[in-house]
Structures are given as C-alpha cells and as structure tokens.
Image: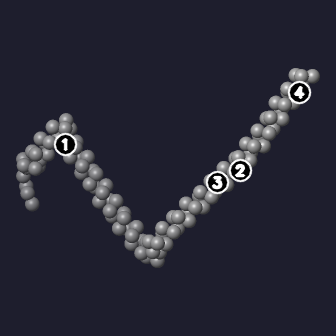
Amino acid sequence: MNTNPINESPVWKQFETEAKKRRCNPVSLALDLLKEQIEIWEDEALDREISRDAQKSGYTEEDAVELVRQYRREKCESMVGSINIIDKDLESGSREIADLFNKSLNRKLL
C-alpha cells in the first residue's frame, strides 16, 4: 500500500488540473465522486440481496414480470372506472345546471 499523501500522487495532480479547468473545486469533486461510488456499491449490494430473496421465493423472472403487468392492468382498470363515475356525475350535474338555468330564464320571460 502506498503511504504517500494523496496530494503528492501524479493522478491527483492530473485530477486537480482537470477539475480547475472546469472551475470545480477538486476536493469537493473528489468527495462527490466518492459518495457516488459508495451509493453504487450500496445499490449493488441491495440488488444482490433482492436477487437472493427472489430466488428463495420460488418466483421466476417471468412470474415477477407478469405480477407487475397484472398490477398495472388492475390499476389502469380502476382508474378508468373512477373516470366513468366522474363522467356520470358531471353529466347529471350538467343536466341539473341546465334545468336551473332554463327555469330562471322562464321566470324572467313571465
């Protein structure tokens, strides 16, 4: 393992030069990159855990895809049903408003 400080490394000097060309603080940029790499490793670990759990469940990938499709179909059907109910309510409300408007017109004419 190298015991030299990072700021003496030729790679760091090149990184620092490139960061400054882009008007970025090289230390902040390096920290952001390290944080991003840590998140990637955590995501990969989570993916492995999910894969192990999925294998234990007995479901195949095709089963999972079908479950997602079924969920989306049911969600879409429920949304369509909700829209139909709203449409019916609007239609009846529109008729009521039209009736009230016609009644008010009839009163003005009399």
Residue displayed at 78% across by 43% down: 92
- Secondary element at image label 1: helix
Q: Mark 3 belongs to which amino acid?
A: Val
* In the image: residue 14, left or right of residue 79: left
Residue 98 against residue 74 in the figure, above or below: above
Residue picked out by circle 1: 27
Residue 109 against residue 76 in the figure, above or below: above
Residue picked out by circle 4: 106
- Secondary element at image label 2: helix
Q: Mark 2 belongs to which amino acid?
A: Ile
Relative image position of residue 49 (x, y in whole percent): 37, 68
Relative image position of residue 3 (x, y in whole percent): 7, 55
Spatial CA distance of label 1 from label 2 is 58 Å
What number is the disc on residue 85?
2
Spatial CA distance of label 3 from label 4 is 39 Å
Spatial CA distance of label 4 from label 2 is 32 Å
Q: Quadrant of the C terminus?
A: top right
Q: Mark 4 belongs to which amino acid?
A: Asn
In this rendering, the label closer to the viewer, 1 or 4: 4
Spatial CA distance of label 1 from label 3 is 53 Å
Which is more N-terminal, label 2 or label 4? 2
Residue 38 against residue 94 in the figure, above or below: below
- Secondary element at image label 3: helix
In this rendering, the label closer to the viewer, 1 or 2: 2
Q: Categorize mark 2 by other alpha carbons within 10 Å: few (<14), some (14-19), many (20+).
A: few
Relative image position of residue 19 (x, y in whole percent): 17, 41
Q: Mark 1 belongs to which amino acid?
A: Val
